Amino acid sequence: MEIKQMQDLLKATDKRRNRFNHQFQRSLRYYKNENDITNRNNGESKLNEHGKDDILRSADNRVSHNFHELLVDQEAGYLTTVPPDIDVQDDSLNDKITDTLGDEFKLRLNQLVVDAANAGVGWLHYWIDDDNQFRYGIVPPSQITPIYSSDLNRKLLAVRRTYQQLNPETGKHFSIHEYWTDKDCTVFKSELPNYTDLELCEDWFSIYDVSSGAETGTSSKLNHGLGKIPFIPFSKNKYELPDLKKYKGLIDVYDNVYNGFVNDVDDIQQVILILTNYGGESLEEFKKTLKEAHAIKVDNVGGTDKSGVDKLTIDIPVEARNTLLESTKADIFTYGEGIDPADFKNDSNASGTAIKMLYSTLELKTGTTESYFTDSLNTLIRAIMNWMGVSDADSRSINQAWHRNQVQNDLEKAQTVSQVAQYSSEEAIAKANPIVDDWQQELRDKQDDIVKRDGYDNPDALNSLNGGEDDEPTE
């Protein structure tokens, strides 16, 4: 791509990119417990008993509540604590794919769920390294601006990736702009916001001689040879909207009511005395007399004279505020499709059916996320198979079995397994056994136990299993 074309593309996508990043950064602030109520404190939850000049209302406490992180991490933990099983109808190929995904696969899936919840979409980038190994990593959503076709297929045509880089010589930051297509990547850089200084990064990629492996120069362009744009979107929902949109207002209401409550408690301790016709000379004398004698004198002529001491206090509508806090908290978990941890505390002996009901809204949200993530993960698996040279990589059937990490009544589940054991296969029993983490390993261990019991420790039984081939011939 030429510089002029890239300048036009950057300007054309800036508005959408800035709007997206504003939304994403707001979600990140709430995820980090830097709710709007803490704006005055630069994002820090802070108590301030004397933050305002108002005599009656001097307290200005600003403490935020991290409901957003709780709801996001609930879904991420529920869906990705146990990574999905991937089956491409070939055990050997399954093992190779698992090895390629690596030990950090579930952590990266977790990060994708968090990114998708905060931004509406998470992004994964894959590449082939210098050792010809398949690699992949999570790209911050704020760096990616996708360019889709306008037809119903909504095909990914190109990706703009923009991020900051530090110039060690000047100590200043500049912007790197990568433009990815299904064939190549071209890298530009700029410092000015209007891109008038945009130029190619001629030294970004190294060029090597194929025969000798020696470096022969540098270039601003890389022909990646992957056949597809090596960026995969992991969408949260159809419209790629962040979760915070559903309940931000409710969190702000909860923060305001709660902190107003705390402010009132602080302010109520400041009792203001109203003195009418005080007989002393000064307020200092009044304080001294009140401290020493616990009494004061006033000039009262009797009759309708209202001379004396009154106190000015603040009334706190405790019941109304408690009711509002409880209903607001319930709405946050309802519209956030999560589970209030207090629900488990209040019913620690819940049955399996009751536990499933507690998880019903979370399961609804997680099921939607799983549907979108399944297609994206299939794209990654096909990219891995193409790298492996699998001939039918783009058409081979891929099965994914996702798991859930949830609280369960193990005793009740074990009793159910025991009751149906004689009518069920060993595989079904192993899968349903609450004390078994890996059902396949459980079956292998059980088989080994049978062989050891009936084979090595009982040669006659082993010979019988082998068809009696070691028996002595009979006449």
Image: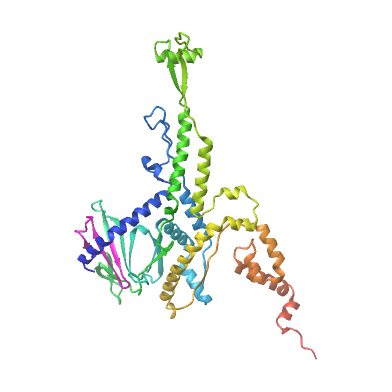
Residue 282 visible to the viewer: yes
Dividing the picture into quarters, in which one does residue 13 lie? bottom left
Does 310 appear above or below 431? Answer: above
Left or right: 31 as drawn, with respect to 160: right
User: What x and y, as percent, mark residue 386?
Assistant: 41, 76
- Name the colour scheme: rainbow
The residue lying furthest to the right in this view is 475
Using the image as rendered, state which of residue 257 and residue 209 is in the foreground: 257
Using the image as rendered, state which of residue 79 and residue 97 is in the foreground: 79
Left or right: 285 as drawn, with respect to 188: right
Residue at x 37%, y 71% (from the top left corner): 152
Dividing the picture into quarters, in which one does residue 429 lie? bottom right
The residue lying furthest to the bottom in this view is 475
Does 154 appear above or below 77? Answer: below
| Span of residues in magenta | 177-203
Does 412 appear above or below 268? Answer: below
Q: Quadrant of the C terminus?
A: bottom right
Dividing the picture into quarters, in which one does residue 39 lie? top left
Residue 190 lies in the magenta stretch: yes
Using the image as rendered, state which of residue 402 and residue 305 is in the foreground: 305
Residue 398 lies in the magenta stretch: no
The number of discs equals 0
Residue at x 21%, y 58% (from the top left corner): 195
User: What x and y, as percent, mark residue 122?
Assistant: 40, 61
Residue 32 visible to the viewer: no
User: What x and y, as percent, mark residue 116?
Assistant: 42, 59
The residue lying furthest to the top in this view is 301
Q: Quadrant of the N terminus?
A: bottom left
User: What x and y, as percent, mark residue 289?
Assistant: 46, 12
